[in-house]
Amino acid sequence: MGMITTNDLKNGYVLDVDGDLVSVVSFQHVKPGKGGAFVRTKLKNMTSGSVVDKTFRAGEKVERVTTESRTMQFLYRDGDDLYLMDNSTYEQLPVAASLVENVDLLAPNTDVQVLFVRDAPIKVELPTFVELSVTRTDPGVKGDTVSNVTKPAEVETGATIDVPLFVNEGDRLKIDTRTREYSARA
């Protein structure tokens, strides 16, 4: 994109500030009675996830970075790398597993959103819900019907989540990838 001034900031813009890639969470133009105007911002670091407050002089130049989001399909895992296939070009790309939050909920052939900055993947987002089969769980105890009682269950990807007592081995479950919670039977 190139250089823009702080007067042109918008929420969601990705900037290169002091060598770190940050996303604009919020901004506010301030014109005090004395002195020059300034722009107060909240910036989220794209790699660490931390949010910091930063103040710029009005009209100061910052570098806006182009971002691109692509839908890709997860094929398989090899060590610390995940192999993804671009759904439009069928090109395969290795991506570090550390770029995925809750990577243990990722099953082969799942479509994911990959955020690219300067043609390099920096974040992989799982779909909000995934459907996985239960491979191992203890049977529910008959008569144990106190509300909201859960038991651990291992799903096909190796992840362990808490499920209601009526869930059995072989059931397909809908799991929320943001909270790692059971949502429904699929």
Image (tube, rainbow, N blue to C red):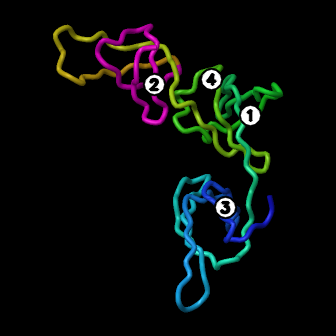
Residue topped by disc 2? 175
Q: Looking at the picture, tell me which residue is in the foreground, 135 or 12.
A: 12
Give the magenta-colored segment's residue range.
157-186
Residue in the image at 70% along x and 62% along y? 16
Q: Looking at the picture, tell me which residue is in the foreground, 177 or 107.
A: 177
Expressed as whole percent of the image width and height from the top left, the position of residue 69 reads 70, 40
Q: Looking at the picture, tell me which residue is in the foreground, 42 or 120.
A: 42
Magenta-span inclusion, residue 173: yes
Q: Amino acid at mark 4?
A: Thr
Tag 3 and tag 4, C-beta contact below 8 Å: no
Q: Residues within 10 Å of mark 4 (few under 14, many from 20)?
A: some
- Pick out the residue farthest to the bottom: 34
Residue topped by disc 4? 110
Mark 1 or mark 2: name the one nearer the start of the chain: 1
Camera-side mark, 1 or 2: 2
Residue topped by disc 1? 94
Query: What is the C-alpha distance between the residues marked 3 and 1?
Result: 23 Å
Q: Amino acid at mark 3?
A: Asp
Q: Residues within 10 Å of mark 3 (few under 14, many from 20)?
A: few
Residue topped by disc 3? 20
Tag 2 and tag 3, C-beta contact below 8 Å: no
Mark 2 or mark 3: name the one nearer the start of the chain: 3
- In the rendered structure, the answer to whether residue 60 lies left or right of residue 165 reads right
Up the image or down, 112 lies above or below 16; here it is above
Camera-side mark, 3 or 1: 3
Mark 3 or mark 1: name the one nearer the start of the chain: 3
Residue in the image at 76% along x and 52% along y? 66
Figure quadrant of residue 22: bottom right
Magenta-span inclusion, residue 109: no
Expressed as whole percent of the image width and height from the top left, the position of residue 174 reads 46, 20
Point out the image quarter for the N terminus. bottom right
Mark 4 or mark 1: name the one nearer the start of the chain: 1
